[in-house]
Image (tube, rainbow, N blue to C red):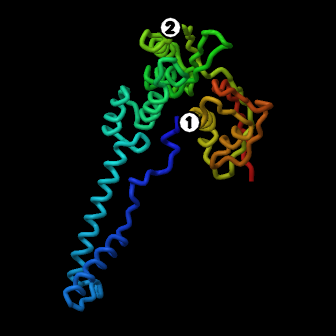
């Protein structure tokens, strides 16, 4: 299935140009005057009453065209928002979860479309896992060997990606239900965060940087991994150094990990212990 979010803007959504609309209106009125044998230079003066009326008409026409654009967008998954997206999702039997934002709902609609099959494709189970809770950021679905054993690896939106027992149970209840599970599949729900990265580093601050810059480095690093990371995201040494190099930080020397943490497409990395040592201030 083609990804609707990756497609270019459709031609039905028109680019708006107020000056072009106004120019077309003025040209039309000039032609009408000329056809009536009247030599009238529309727009020769900014105070020309005909031009003032045409400017108002051009602005109203632009607003109308913008409304047509909005109506077209409301019927497209990639652009629809709010209650328009709710109605579009309902067509595919997808309902907004409590507190769910448009971006997450849009992703689930696309999953529901691509997962429609009685054969139980990967996205069928991913869509089911995502609707179990708005705390599910993503899920990886893969088969063990050639047998019936299926793994559903869950990544959480909170707790830096680590799903707790309650979230795993919620996903398990949905994906193993009779309405979802293909009868020949044996499903196990696990945490996607299978790789733990321990970090040890030294950090120096710039002379005028407040101490709070250093104090917030660990929380900032964990938040950055939760936001930027995900399934298949490798935690490289260069990424760790760059993320720790916040405004006010003069230097970072990374001791651990000694190598990049490379994860598979069905897994995610999480931070374990973070040992940051304040080494003073550089020049």
Give me the residue at 54% from left, 8% from top.
184
Vertical relation: 173 (above or below) 105: above
Q: Earlier in the sequence, mark 1 or mark 2?
A: 2
- Measured in 3D between alpha carbons, the distance from the residue under mark 1 to the one under mark 2, in whole angstroms, is 36 Å
Sort mark 1 into few (<14), some (14-19) or many (20+) by Cα contacts within 10 Å. Answer: few
Name the residue that disc number 1 marks. Answer: 227
Mark 2 surroundings: few (<14), some (14-19) or many (≥20) residues within 10 A: few
Percent across and percent down for residue 199 are 72, 30
Could you tell me which residue is drawn at 77 percent across and 40 percent down?
A: 253
Task: Tell me: residue 236, above or below residue 267.
Answer: below
Please name whichever residue, 231 or 148, is drawn nearer the observer in this view of the structure: 148
Left or right, 57 with respect to 181, comes to: left
Q: Quadrant of residue 271?
A: top right
Q: Which mark is residue 183?
A: 2
**Residue 242 got which mark?**
none
168 vs 210, left or right, is left
Numbered disc in front, either 1 or 2: 2
Say which element carries label 1.
helix
Whole-percent x, y for residue 242 in the image: 69, 43
Q: Is residue 205 above or below residue 140?
A: below
Q: Residue, x 68% and y 23% (percent of image)?
A: 196
Q: Nearer the viewer, residue 125 or 228?
A: 125
- Residue 110 x, y percent position in the rendering: 46, 33
Extreme front residue here? 35
Q: Secondary structure at mark 2?
A: loop
Whether residue 119 is visible? yes
Quarter of the rendering containing residue 54: bottom left
Relative side of 54 to 95, left or right:
left
């Amino acid at each position: 299935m083609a990804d609707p979010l990756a497609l270019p803007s459709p031609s039905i959504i028109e680019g708006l140009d107020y000056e072009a609309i106004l120019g077309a209106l003025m040209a039309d009125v000039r032609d009408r005057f000329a056809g009536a044998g009247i030599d009238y230079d529309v727009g020769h003066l900014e105070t020309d009453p005909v031009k003032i009326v045409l400017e108002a008409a051009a602005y109203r026409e632009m607003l109308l065209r913008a409304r047509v654009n909005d109506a077209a967008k409301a019927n497209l998954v990639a652009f629809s928002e709010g209650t328009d997206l709710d109605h579009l999702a309902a067509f595919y039997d997808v309902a907004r979860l409590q507190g769910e934002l448009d971006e997450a709902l849009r992703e689930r609609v696309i999953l529901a479309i691509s997962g429609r099959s009685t054969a139980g494709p990967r996205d069928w189970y991913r869509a089911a896992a995502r609707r179990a809770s708005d705390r599910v950021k993503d899920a990886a679905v893969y088969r063990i060997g050639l047998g019936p054993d299926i793994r559903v690896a869950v990544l959480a939106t909170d707790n830096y990606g680590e799903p707790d027992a309650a979230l795993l149970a919620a996903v398990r209840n949905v994906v193993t239900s009779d309405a979802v599970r293909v009868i020949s599949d044996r499903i196990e729900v696990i945490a996607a965060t299978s790789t733990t990265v321990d970090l040890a580093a030294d950090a120096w601050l710039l002379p005028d940087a407040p101490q709070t810059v250093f104090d917030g480095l660990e929380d900032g690093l964990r938040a950055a991994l939760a936001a930027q990371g995900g399934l298949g995201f490798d935690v490289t040494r260069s990424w760790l150094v760059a993320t720790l190099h916040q405004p006010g930080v003069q230097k970072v020397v990374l001791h651990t990990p000694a190598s990049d943490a490379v994860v598979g497409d069905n897994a995610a990395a999480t931070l374990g212990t973070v040992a940051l040592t304040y080494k003073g201030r550089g020049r």
